[in-house]
Image (tube, rainbow, N blue to C red):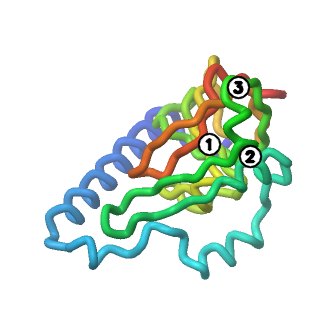
Amino acid sequence: MDGLQNTDRQIIGKGMRRACLLALVFLCTSGLSKQDVPKPAQPAEERKAQDALPQSKDPMWKVLGKTKIHLDEKEWHYSATIPPEVKALVGTQVTITGFVLPLEDTETFKHFLISKRTPTCAFCPPGEPNEIADVWLEKPMKWDQDAVTVTGTFELMENADLGLFFKLSKAVLKK
């Protein structure tokens, strides 16, 4: 136990949301142009440091990694060239092991990103868009810092702003 009560966690969670919102408002109103904002791709130094952390060795990441990611720097949108091998997975049950990045500010959650790489920041997906999948569980789970395995229906999605292209719906956490 980390010594925090549930009310403490709620206060911290609200404080984090408020701080993120204020940072976003500041960035949006500070007069920065798109040229002033750094590229959204993961910097080489960060990637090198992250390479030393645990990674999922699940072969599914190798398959998804064949997807070629493109960034339109003028529009700041991602696009993906999905190979036939990945397209063939659509509608099938897929099992994948990776690290959890929760997207809900609750003690248990159903929606998260799963990544090949260990997350190092609660606000940034670790790695490239072909190393991350959007997951929707049927039943809530508690956060786990270790790799988890989920099985769900594979779907393609296109979120050009966030660079999300893979989704597992109706997913189940494997024990």
* Cα–Cα span, label 2 and label 1: 9 Å
Is 76 drawn above or below residue 171 in the view shown? below
Is 73 drawn above or below residue 85 in the view shown? below
Comparing marks 3 and 2, which lies closer to the viewer? 3
> Which residue matches tag 2?
98
Please tell me in which quadrant of the rendered image residue 8 appears. Answer: top left
Please tell me in which quadrant of the rendered image residue 4 appears. Answer: top right
The residue positioned 58% from the left and 27% from the top of the image is: 136
Indicate which disc residue 133 carries: 1
The numbered mark, 1 or 3, whose residue comes first in the sequence reads 1
Quadrant of the frame with the N terminus:
top right
The numbered mark, 3 or 2, whose residue comes first in the sequence reads 2
> Which residue matches tag 3?
152
Type of amino acid under label 2: Gly
Left or right: residue 6 versus residue 32 is right
Q: Nearer the viewer, residue 117 or 94?
A: 94
* Cα–Cα span, label 1 and label 3: 11 Å
